[in-house]
Amino acid sequence: MAINKTDNGARLANAILFPVVGLVLLAVAFSVALIAYTSRSADDAAMESERRLLRGSTQLQLELLAKEQEGAAVWDLADYYTRPVSVSTQWLDANMGHWLYANHGHDQIVIVGQDGNPIYNALRGQQIDPGESRPLLSGIWPLIARTRAKFITRFRSLPSGLFVIERPLNGFTRSIHETGFALHEGELAFVSVTAISPELKQFVAKRRPPAVLVSVKKLQGARLSALGTRSGVNGLNATPGTDQPKETATFDVRSPLGMPIGYLTWTANTPGSKILSGVGPVLLFLAVTIAGLTGVVLFYTRQNTRRLAESEARAQHAALHDSLTGLANRDFFADRFREELAGWSAEKGLVGVIYIDLDHFKDINDTLGHAAGDEVIREAARRLRVLAPDEATLARISGDEFALLLPGYASRASIEHILRRIQDRFSVPMYISGTHLHVSLSVGAALAPDDSLSMGELLRKADIALYSAKGAGRGRWAFFDVSMEEHVRTRENLAHALRDAIGQDRLHVVYQPQTTIDGATTLSVEALLRWTDPKMGPVSPSVFVPIAEEIGLINELGLYVLRKACEDAAAWPHLGIAVNVSPSQFRHPRFIDDLRDTLETCKFEPTRLEIEVTETVFADNDSNILSTLKQVQEMGVRVALDDFGTGYSSLSYLRRFPFDTLKIDRSFIADLEVAPHAHSILSTIIDLGDALGMKVVAEGIETRQQAAILQRTNCDRLQGFYLSRPVSPQDVPAAEARLAAGKEPLAAISLSA
């Protein structure tokens, strides 16, 4: 039988070819399926990566919004002007509403008072009715409630029965806040709620909910475009509403109530699909295409991962650095400080921790504005950065306070050399907003191991040294000394005792007569505050009045004196009464109301009252001061300019406001018997007051010779120990009678006596 080789060859070929073709077809099909699967996975991975980037960027923007609020919300003045008893929408509009809109573009700013009701509302920088904010507030009320709850739970009970609240120590911001999304005018918007709180600490008798600052930024236009750029996504859009968009690349946006309010959509990057459409027609290059696809997928994945890593690195850097100056922040500084102390040994030398504070920085903010204040902070940071040694750590701790860590120094003299260079550099004025500003520094230093090896103790002692440098006149440095701690403890005890003395009515007021030029007739008396503590004994006003200024009691102290003086003076209807008013009390927004309420409560005739203000009230060149002075005079109360010639005033103030009385500072009187030109200067001041139609009072008369010299001038009144020491309210009539029946009237005293 003949064998058909052709068939055998065909069968063999088929037996070989069909499996090979099948394998090739299977390989091609598998490759196509693998490519399709890989491309789809690449699209999904790219979209998920973009979604993570977008989520991270939106969270970062919300944190930055809270950071923008921090400068206005964490502020002693903001805390004061949002309290129910001292709320000032005018101040809130100028310093919070307008400032946040002008500097950070906040579309709407709402301030919710401590009682939960809106007290201020501004839309695009324009103040509107607070009631119009209620729809917005109802939609974000969980944020407000959580912020208020977090604030209240941060109060810490003290053994004294008081509560203290402090700013958060860690985190990107130093504020108590909540963030989220909301609908604003039908558009998706970022919203941040920040508790309005004091800058450092606040001691209160009982816990209270805070006022909160609500800021809204619409997610549209350039702001939306910038968010898309930061996230690395294309065609980012914000779509309000609950209807699911047709786009597959979406980001679900929910309100604080948990309700869907819209979506963020963008054009997804689809690297896999693009590659698949290109390799379809060329299956012959399947292996190369698979390799290429793998490479492309890896490339895109690597790019997206790198962008995510860069975004995380930027967020981490922002969390450890100050946004205004670029310096390290408190957390970074604390970490470095702990590392230095943990690895310290005697051969490594001294470690210096330096606190640096800009003197009178608040005056710069108040007079030139926050923008100028920020520029001063930046310039100060630039100068300190240049002067700080390479191994040092420089950080911005708070508003105008910096910290410098100096490790590995052989002696205190080496650290002093650095401090001297810093002080010398700041003796050069800064050019800010077209003005040359002389900004000085107060510096406090503590050394490890001399003062301690505990970070907390070293920071505390550096702060005490800084406080001592400020108390010594500012513009200088001080190293911690044990005596400083005792001084601080003494001041704290005095402050506590002063609070108790005011609350328990243990202060008393004495009165010093002001007489006619002959010393015989008493025209009025000046009220002077005295304090005798049961444990410490008599405490001088020069000691406790500055403490009252520091702890915020000066207004209460001044009202105490005013009320007591009006009550006591009811027994002397023929005498006037003079009461000193401190600059801080005079600048208080409720001063006029408090003055009017006191006069009405005591049924005291305003024309009998004379308030004495010193020239330091004009230090800020504030136009509101002159307005307040005029309101006082319009009430019928007389105004005296005290300590004339020693402060900031000039003839321009005397022309702009007609003071009723001019009080010559006692330093001019003391020089009468020793300084050759003192008499001429005194006569000039008296003639100036006479020319301006003001009564002139010479205080500090301590000798008969001084009184005799003044009798030869046009001075209207005399006051001083020579005539009478301050007496109790019960002894005022006796002092008046003694002066009237003087055994040696001033008219009988000759200049040669």
Image: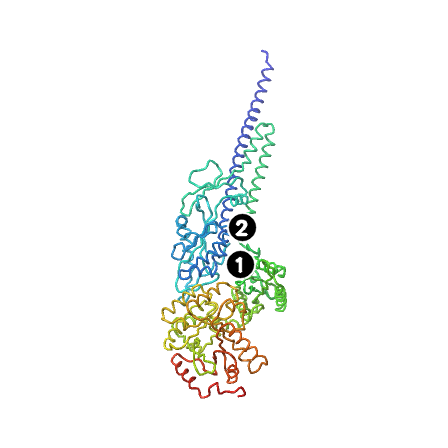
Q: Quadrant of residue 418?
A: bottom right
- Amino acid bearing label 1: Gly
Q: Nearer the viewer, mark 1 or mark 2?
A: 1
- On the rendered structure, is 572 left or right of 433? left
| Mark 1 lies on residue | 369
Q: Can the viewer see residue 448?
A: no
Q: Nearer the viewer, residue 326 or 74?
A: 74
How far from the left and from the top, in percent, is residue 279? 58, 30
Dots 1, 2 in contact, CB < 8 A: no
Cα separation between marks 1 and 2: 30 Å
Figure colour scheme: rainbow
How far from the left and from the top, in percent, is residue 377? 57, 59
Note whether 461 is above or below 244 in the view shown. Answer: below
For the residue carrying disc 1, how many other residues have a C-alpha within 10 Å: few (<14), some (14-19), or many (20+)?
some
**SS assignment at label 2:** helix
**Earlier-in-chain disc, 1 versus 2:** 2
Note whether 127 is above or below 338 in the view shown. Answer: above
- On the rendered structure, is 349 left or right of 713? right
- Amino acid bearing label 2: Ala
Q: Nearer the viewer, residue 417 or 40?
A: 417
**SS assignment at label 1:** loop
Q: Residue at point 54% right, 48% down?
A: 312
Q: Nearer the viewer, residue 393 or 266?
A: 266
- On the rendered structure, is 229 left or right of 735? right
How far from the left and from the top, in percent, is residue 492? 46, 70
Q: Nearer the viewer, residue 288 or 206?
A: 206
| Mark 2 lies on residue | 315
Q: Give the residue furthest to the top.
A: 1
Note whether 237 is above or below 106 in the view shown. Answer: above
Q: Quadrant of residue 23?
A: top right
Q: Which mark is residue 9?
A: none
